[in-house]
Image: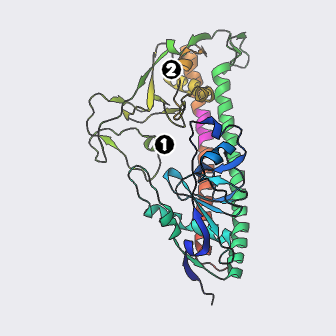
Amino acid sequence: MIVWKKYRLKDICSYIGSGTTPKSSNSKYYDNGIYNWVNTGDLNNGIVSNSKQQITDSALKDFPTLKFYPKGTIIEAMYGATIGKVGMLDMNATVNQACCAMIVDRNKAIPNFVLYYLLYYKPQLLKESFGGTQPNVNQFKVSNIAISIPSREEQQRIVTYLDTKLSEIDHQVSLLTSKRDAYLRLKKSIINHAVTRGLNPNVKMKDSGIEWIGEVPEHWEVKRMKDIVKLMKGRTPEDLTFEEISYPYLTMDYLRNRSGKEILYPQKTAGLLKIDVGEIIVLWDGANAGEFILSKEGYLGSTMAVFLCDCKIVDKNYLYYLLKSVEKHSKYFANGTTIPHFDSLTIMNHQYALPPLPEQRAIATYLDDKCAKIDTIVSNLDKQISRYGDLKRSLIDEVITGKRAV
């Protein structure tokens, strides 16, 4: 019978520490940087072979707490949305303060085994996290994580087995993801063609005078967005509750149907902007600033705005597809230093090709049908990808705890 011995992470690591973030406002610490600087966004639950940002000699000089961690160091995120994500360095690198870096004593454990164990332990780590505004753990909590370790030979068998099986799963996920992305590109292409060329392949064309659009059907008009719509921003309620006493507060979790997220309701609704199902919303702030989505019924927050259109000029469903066709550009309009903001003036002053109202409705109906079919395919692919994710987690859980012999 194989005996698994219990340790704490600090018992099997020769060093546990974190890092530092040089002042982000000072470009001399980052411009033309040459040293890898890993933050939690670089962690991929696997091997970390590069970092999105690098730092300079000036950063190392001015922030002596920056430490270089060697290849094989395990990194775990301690704060925020990425808490519990892990990675193993395939390079020498510095890290930021949100990363807990662990150098495993190779005489006591195989680093890859510890990496897999931390993947298994993530749900428990989330339960143990604390903090008012965001979940977080500290180095003390991480260093005292209990880990059961078999013999070195058994560790190696487990690592080899998981490396092989998870690689096979990742390959299948990669194939499904590529197929999913291809369908999403097809959807964009269909939308872009319909709102710039219409449905008649034999229609006479003219130069739109708009460089990024080119030719459009001869009978279409060119109008500025601000001539056909108005934008109205939402407001953030003073108090929110989980008690269903009004229409919901439209958070992104609620709009995107994220499971396990509580629905919030304003306690006082005076002065708030209530919108109906199917209204066109643009995300005003944050990483997704410039994205257009369709609303549910509820109260709109200050990080979003709704398009109010003149129904005598533009069909709302057609407008949604028109906006989706320029979404890539609208995201480029996003500006701001620390938090991106949607630049409404730019998109509202842009010119767009607009067919007659009956043709708009016909195009919108056509796109509803085409996009619904593609969305169904993409949804099925997402479900398959999700099932592979579940399989991956269950495989790690069973093998890394010895429930499945390898």
Q: Residue at x 51, y 22 (%)?
A: 344
Residue 15 seen anywhere in this rendered image of the structure: yes
Give the x, y percent position of residue 71.
72, 61
Q: Residues within 10 Å of mark 1 (few under 14, many from 20)?
A: few
Name the residue that disc number 2 marks.
315
Name the residue that disc number 1 marks.
256
Q: Earlier in the sequence, mark 1 or mark 2?
A: 1
Q: Left or right: 35 with respect to 82? A: right
Q: Quadrant of residue 48?
A: bottom right
**Disc 1 secondary structure class:** loop
Q: Which mark is residue 65?
A: none
Please state which of residues 213 and 33 is positioned toward the viewer in this rendering.
Answer: 33
Q: Residues within 10 Å of mark 2 (few under 14, many from 20)?
A: some
Please state which of residues 368 and 124 is positioned toward the viewer in this rendering.
Answer: 124
Q: Does 31 appear above or below 154?
A: above
- Residue mark closest to the camera, 1 vs 2: 1
Q: Residue at x 62, y 64 (%)?
A: 392
- Alpha carbon separation for disc pair 1 and 2: 24 Å
Q: Quadrant of residue 296?
A: top left
Residue 371 in the magenta stretch? The answer is yes
Say how many tags the image has: 2
Magenta-tinted stretch:
369-375
Mark 2: which amino acid? Asp
Please state which of residues 18 and 319 is positioned toward the viewer in this rendering.
Answer: 18
Mark 1 and 2 residues: CB-CB less than 8 Å, in contact?
Answer: no
Q: Left or right: 163 with respect to 355? A: right
Q: Does 59 appear above or below 358?
A: below
The secondary structure making up most of the magenta span is helix
**Disc 2 secondary structure class:** loop
Mark 1: which amino acid? Arg
Q: Left or right: 321 with respect to 272? A: right
Residue 381 in the magenta stretch? The answer is no
